[in-house]
């Protein structure tokens, strides 16, 4: 078959291979189509049709993909921020709820403790008051009783003074008599030694009246 002479392809075999690898066609397809090969022509035509569509639609499709990617990224970043903030806020809310619950429990416990402390303190105060009242009553009674005994004793001691004085005087008189007799012998004059008499009938009667009036 007679065909046009190809001077270029033999000199650019590597580039021809690149065309096949990168674009899916070769210059052999070009030559075959030029010679009326329907399959090669159809292959080139289909690739050309796809090329035209790509040239027309690729920028729009690329922009659409770009918007999809950016939108997906923005949406997921927003979801992430919302979820992160929600998680942090949920923790803070749970913490606040727990603190409030604990504070409420502590308040209830403290109220119960205060009530118990008040009851114990009131009971202790009532017991102390009753003790003090009983103590003061008993002390007052004992003080009065002891004072009465002391007063009666003091009065009795005063009433006994003449008798005690008389006993002392009698002992002194006897001592003087004995000393006088021992000193003077037969020349003794005991009648010259005076004898004190504190217990006269008048004073005895007076003491009896006073003691009777005082309940002795």
Image (cartoon, rainbow, N blue to C red):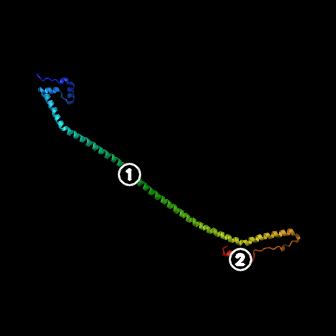
The reply, left or right, for residue 26 in relation to residue 156 is: left
Q: Residue at x 41, y 54 (%)?
A: 103
- Picture layout, residue 112 above or below residue 211: above
- Mark 1, residue position: 96
Give the Cα distance between marks 1 and 2: 97 Å
- Residue 22 pos. (x, y %): 21, 30
The one nearer the camera, 132 or 23, is: 23
- Picture layout, residue 130 above or below residue 47: below
Circle 1 or circle 2, nearest the eye: 1
Name the image quarter holding residue 148: bottom right
Question: Split into 4 quadrants, where in the image is the N terminus?
Answer: top left
- Mark 2, residue position: 206
**Does label 1 or label 2 sit earlier along the sequence?**
1
Mark 2: give few (<14), some (14-19) or many (20+) Cα within 10 Å: few
Question: Split into 4 quadrants, where in the image is the C terminus?
Answer: bottom right
Q: Residue at x 46, y 58 (%)?
A: 114
Mark 1: give few (<14), some (14-19) or many (20+) Cα within 10 Å: few
The reply, left or right, for residue 21 in relation to residue 129 is: left
The one nearer the camera, 21 or 132, is: 21
Circle 2: element type: helix
Numbered circles on residues, count: 2
- Picture layout, residue 135 above or below residue 198: above
């Amino acid at each position: 078959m007679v065909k046009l002479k190809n001077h270029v392809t033999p000199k650019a075999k590597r580039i021809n291979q690149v065309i096949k690898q990168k674009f899916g066609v070769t210059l052999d397809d070009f030559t075959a189509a030029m010679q009326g090969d329907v399959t090669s022509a159809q292959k080139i035509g289909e690739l050309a049709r796809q090329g035209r569509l790509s040239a027309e639609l690729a920028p729009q499709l690329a922009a659409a993909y770009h918007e999809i990617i950016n939108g997906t990224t923005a949406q997921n970043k927003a979801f992430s921020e919302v979820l992160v903030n929600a998680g942090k806020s949920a923790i803070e809310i749970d913490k606040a709820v727990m603190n409030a619950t604990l504070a409420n429990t502590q308040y209830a416990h403290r109220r119960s403790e205060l009530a118990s402390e008040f009851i114990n303190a009131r009971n202790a105060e009532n017991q102390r008051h009753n003790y003090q009242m009983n103590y003061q009553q008993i002390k007052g009674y004992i003080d009065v009783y002891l004072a009465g005994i002391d007063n009666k004793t003091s009065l009795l001691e005063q009433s006994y003074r003449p008798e005690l004085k008389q006993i002392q005087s009698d002992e002194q008189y006897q001592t003087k008599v004995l000393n006088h007799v021992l000193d003077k012998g037969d020349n003794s004059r005991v009648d010259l030694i005076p004898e004190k008499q504190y217990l006269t009938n008048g004073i005895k009667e007076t003491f009896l009246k006073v003691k009777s009036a005082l309940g002795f």
